[in-house]
Amino acid sequence: MSIVPKNKIPLMVVVIITLLIVIAAGVWFMVIKPNQALPKSIENTYLPNRRPVVGIQMVDHNNQPFTEQRFKGKWSFLFFGFINCPDVCPTTLLVMKSVWAKLPASAKQAPEPQLVFVSVDPDRDTPAIMKDYVQYYHPDFIGITGEHKYLDILTVQVGALYGYEDGETDNDYTVNHSAQIILIDPQGYFRGVFSGPLQVDEIVKTFTAIRDYHPG
Amino acid sequence: MKGLLFFALYALSFSVHADPSLSVSEAWIPEAPPVAKVMAGYLEIKNKSDRTIILESISANDFERVEMHQTIKKNGMAKMVKQTSIKIPAHGGVSFRRGGLHLMLIGPKRKFKRGEKTRIILKTDQTSTEIDLVIKEASLDDHSAHH
């Protein structure tokens, strides 16, 4: 009967080893492997590790509250700029207008894309001015802004930057701002960065591929 | 005071002419939303002479002020840097284009329609020269590529 304990110990070892293998495999498939297996077409844009975007208290161009709830169920493209920006901002909005025109119908189905122009110049860019501005480029584009503390809450979470530089008069300052486009997934997580130079066809292709790849 | 202003304008009208050593092309302004207080201006300037010409300032009746700015993108940040003067090399040229050097047309005094022209005055270290910028549909096409 002394054989029984001898048999029990190897059995425990087998169970433990098996468990360790299962856990390791789980970690491998759920955490490590997805990072390595990103399709080439999206690996420069898509963030495998999602990051929540919360505490958003902005106001949209219709003077309505804009919180993180407005990210849910849509793919949000965020661009940070200001209205007295004659070169970079109009060019980016023209790029996105062109992207909107070129997106295949399948990429416009729910969860549909939305373009959100975030003004980092809330002292000059009122909701009314923003409405005229963004809708000049596309009637579906949305303009949002907010108090500096809320702008900071948003920009910090998506890795965007902005700052001011004095001009000749008090109202004449210029604004430095991140030039990339931030992608937020329909679950409300920071999911991607389109870095410059922004090319229309590249954005269309990459976004379509991200939609195909993204779970849910 | 009025007389002095008149004299200044009168004198200016004589000093303004086309500088034969400069040739300007593709001078345009992309249409902007009516709420925009700043518009961009783009143009190509060629210096046909044997000496460097320095573009010192730009003025325009239809705008409160015109500045020259360089868009710089560094580490994902876009920044505009005001240029106090621009050197146009002998037998060379300078391009004011999207995403680079551009005119900042600040404080439009009127609304512009597509196809309309607005005059600006380029003041160099030698002369002043008048050119017209055409208001065109804002598009991603590089207008200089049409010629």
Image: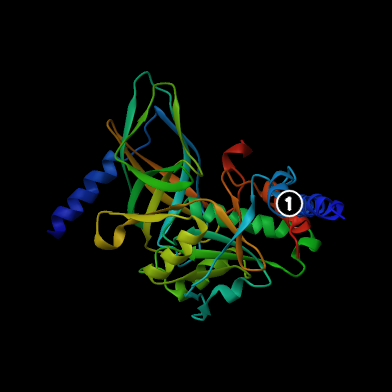
In the image: residue B10, left or right of residue A192: left
In the image: residue B96, left or right of residue A163: right
Which residue is at the far bottom? A64
Which residue is at the far top? B50
Q: Quadrant of residue A106?
A: bottom right
Could you say where residue B41 lies in the image, as x and y percent from the top left?
45, 48
Q: Name the kind of residue labelled 1 in the image.
A: Leu
Q: Is residue B123 above or below residue A48?
A: above
Q: Which residue is mark 1?
A: A20
Could you say where residue A182 lies in the image, as x and y percent from the top left?
57, 57
Query: Going 54% across and 66% down the picture, which residue do you hit?
Result: A53
Query: Going 81% across and 54% down the picture, which residue do you hit?
Result: A5
Quadrant of image for the C terminus of chain B: top right
Which residue is at the far left? B1
Could you say where residue A135 lies in the image, as x and y percent from the top left?
57, 69
Could you say where residue A82 lies in the image, as x and y percent from the top left?
44, 61
Q: Tell me if residue A78 can be seen.
A: yes
Nearer to me, B36 or A182: A182
